[in-house]
Amino acid sequence: MGSIAKLNEKEKVLVCQELREAIGSNKVKDDENVLATYGFDSSRVLFQKPSFVVLPENTEDVKQVLKIANRHIIPVTVMSGGVNIVGLCIPADGGIVLDLRRMDKIIEINTDSGYAVIEPGVIFDKFTAALAEKGFRCQVPTSPGGSTPLGNYLMRPSGSLTTRHLDPILDLEVVSPNGIVMSTGSSHFPSAGGSMRYGPFPDLAGLFCCSYGTLGVVTKATVRIYPINESNRVVLAAFDSYESSSKYTKDIINHNICEHCLIWSWQLYRTYEITYSTDWVPEVPLELMGNPLKPPKGIPYNVVTTLMSGYEEAMIVNEKLCEKVARKYGGRIISRKEAEDIMPGALYQWEQHYLGYHQVMSKTFGTGRYMAYLVMAEPQAICHLEPWAVKKLASLGVAPVGYYSMPFDFGRSMFFRMFIYPDPQNEELLSKTAATLEEMHQEAMRRYGAIPFRYRPGLPWLKQTGEYYHFLKKVKQEVDPNNVLNPHLGLF
């Protein structure tokens, strides 16, 4: 692998001139004030200031920047919308930030085959609005509308609105570090569109998904979209245990009753009440500071939100089926009046999210520093993991401890994501919490057969995969021999 050295001042001037000559001076920034804003996010990853911020406007710009970076062996960090919270886009000290936000074209919305072709700078607000005009929708995560579909989808999406497909990616256009541009799906045949991920040859899209910008820069993607049907509604079901909630979601998914369902812990859905009627974050209510395994009287331990869509006649039948299946597992359906009485903030969020196909960003980030725990495992394994993980985090004194969970691929696997907000000024607690989260990942892998959902900088998960790691390392050496793409991430 190539050795990366920090540029001296003379070299910076020369490289800056070369970049500006290649793609235009207005696309290359080296102002100290601009550079400083790219050196951090809300994570605990240490500040790193880049030497340049480059804002390409097309694939050819990206190609030229990567060729220059490769020639001078300058590390490159890629970002799209800039809504970053876990340190994955913190640049290498003295490197290049490749900010793709100007590449924000929706190139095609194909309602026949059900896909859209978008650039990496397209944000969810723009994408969902354009799709709605055509009577379509996309997977929507719990991140804000200013985040990007590709930023979410390429890291394995936590997107809602469909649990039948975990992966919305069909086809990618990728630029390699040496400037080669290629397509991974059916569009690599000149006369074909991007509707098919798999052709008669190996699937390469998966190589770039979950590679966190270390193997190539995605400049265009074809993603799944879904029709907005004649009728839709959200059914709320209450349960006293996660296991009952999990069995309910698997049952209704396997019987094709719904398109999506999500299990919410009581401390998470109750946090939406904190700022429902105010723009500021008041003191966290005492009820949320208690034992997360014991909700107050009258508050369901879990609420399962079930999105259904189709013809109205089918919706009437499916609502009754949801009630039948909920009773089967000891649960009940929550009426709209009850929801308005005990969880109006959550109800508003769910209806905006599921029926309006639009993100509603929780203001609970104001309660502390966001830290998360994300794993996937087989359904029964998550049932055993849930009480253990909740107790483990609660013992740190970082309440509220909230989570949501959902099935993917018709319930073959369950996604489990926990949220905590420790005091950002308490460095000792933050360090202890970070260490505990990593211990929990390791123990979840050993005890429950879980896998981490997304990579976090500096963690050794890839190296624990044995020959898989060694094979991927060889791929990295082949496609990026100078190691210019995100070397500081510590993935390889």
Image (tube, rainbow, N blue to C red):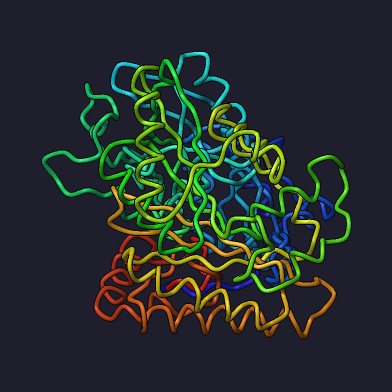
Q: Is residue 381 left or right of residue 17?
A: left
* Number of marks present in the image shown: 0
Q: Relative to 142, does residue 38 appear above or below in the rendering?
A: below
Q: Is residue 156 left or right of residue 270?
A: left
Location of the N terminus (image quadrant): bottom left
- In percent of width and height, residue 479 lies at 34, 59
- In percent of width and height, residue 268 lies at 64, 57
Location of the C terminus (image quadrant): bottom left
Q: Is residue 421 left or right of residue 404?
A: right
List the single residue furthest toward the left: 200
Query: In this orientation, does residue 371 appear?
Result: yes
Query: In this orientation, does residue 123 appear?
Result: no
Q: Is residue 173 left or right of residue 298?
A: left
Q: Relative to 269, does residue 370 appear above or below in the rendering?
A: below
- In percent of width and height, residue 286 lies at 81, 66
Report the residue at 65% width, 55% height from top: 298
- In percent of width and height, residue 301 lies at 57, 60
Report the residue at 37% width, 36% height from top: 259
Report the residue at 54% width, 47% height from top: 65
